[in-house]
Structure formats: C-alpha cells, structure tokens
Image: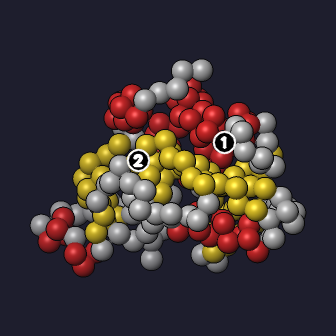
Amino acid sequence: MNILTEKELLEIFKKTEALLSGHFLLTSGRHSNVYFQCAKVLQYPEYNKNICAVIANHYAGFKIDTVIAPAIGGIVVGQEVARQLKKRFIFAEREDKKLSLRRGFSIKKGERLLVCEDVVTTGGSVFEVINIINQSEAVPVGVGFIVDRSKGKVQFGVHQKSVISLEAISYEPENCHLCNENIPFIKPGSRKVV
C-alpha cells in the first residue's frame, strides 16, 4: 500500500472539499477560518484505507487488544484502523452530554486500547475516551488521529500519531476577528455546541 505524504493528503482534502475556508464554529466552542470535514474525504473507501494506513502502520508493532473511538467523527477512522490491525473495534457515544460505552460494549481490566479520532483541536473527546479506559482499569496504549489542528500542542499523556499536523488558528468567540467583521459563522460538525 502506498503511504501518502502530507502534501498529497492535503491535496486529497482539498479535492474532496474536506478542507474548508470561511468562518466556523468548532465543536470546542471556538471559532476558526479553517475547517476539516473528514467525513467528506472518508466517504471514499480508497482514501479512507490509505489515510488510516498511516495510523495502522505506525501502531502495527504495539500490543493492542481493541481500538476505540468517540462517536461520531472517530467511528470511520477507528473501524478502518481496527480492520487493518485485525483488532476488535468499539466506540463511545454521547448520553446526557457525556461520552460513555453503550450498545453492550465493555472494556476489561488490563485490556490495551488504541484511541482513534478524526480531528483534534482541543482533544476534549479523546480525553473523555481515555478517562473511560482509565476508569475501566484498562491501558490507553496510544492515540491515532487524522488531523492535528494544534500542531502538537495537545498532548494526551500517551503515545500519539497524527496523519496531518498543522496549526489551524482558532479563537475564543469574544476574541474572534471574523465575528468583529460581522462575517456569519456556520457549524458544519456533527455535535451541537451549546
């Protein structure tokens, strides 16, 4: 399988309209002029396979029992990484604004898990999944994600691998120059921001 360079990956993101410019309200509540809609690129199985191969190949030598992802963005990534690593896959989903295991999913004490996500800005969902793992007395082995919007500033306290790492500036709403210019924002993600 051909492992794509970061430049080739960014071209795929642009070609599939997964890399957007404008004024966006992020899941974190922050505003940005750049948005990565990973679902737009991951809808193509060949791109999904090649992008997730970067994560799967990186973690191939790690002892992993299960891959876990936060719903909804991380599900497609986690499923494909798990398929390539030939591991079980589960996901956590929101219930009363908090991620939890549902649908009969469970984690055993001592189980070794790889967390997968599509985009990391503040890492909130990944930190929640790591907390679920720790509460289960299991082991978070690492985190694999497609886009690191923080350019390495967000650290999860375990091994981590991003496919694309770049600093996409984001602003607190009260400090957003796009708001000051009266440019309306859109919320393109899957989770409502309150």
For image coordinates 36% across by 31% down, the residue present is: 7
Residue 96 in the image: state x and y as whole percent: 64, 77
Residue designated by label 1: 59
Q: How far apart are marks 1 and 2 (CA)?
A: 18 Å
Q: What element carries label 2?
A: strand
Report the colour scheme: secondary structure
Residue 189 visible here: no
For image coordinates 26% across by 56% down, the residue present is: 33
Residue 124 is left or right of residue 78, and the answer is left
Query: Which numbered disc covers residue 165?
Result: 2
- Decide which of 44, 170 is in the foreground and name it: 170
Residue 159 location, quadrant: bottom right
- The amino acid type of the residue labelled 1 equals Tyr
- Decide which of 193, 63 is in the foreground and name it: 63
Residue 169 in the image: state x and y as whole percent: 28, 59
Quarter containing the C terminus: bottom left
- Decide which of 142, 178 is in the foreground and name it: 142
* Disc 2 crowd, CA 10 A, few/some/many (<14, 14-19, 20+): some
For image coordinates 70% across by 37% down, the residue present is: 60
1 and 2 marks in contact (CB < 8 Å): no
Quarter containing the N terminus: top right
- The amino acid type of the residue labelled 2 equals Ser
Q: In this view, does 131 lie above or below 69?
A: below
Query: Which numbered disc covers residue 74?
Result: none
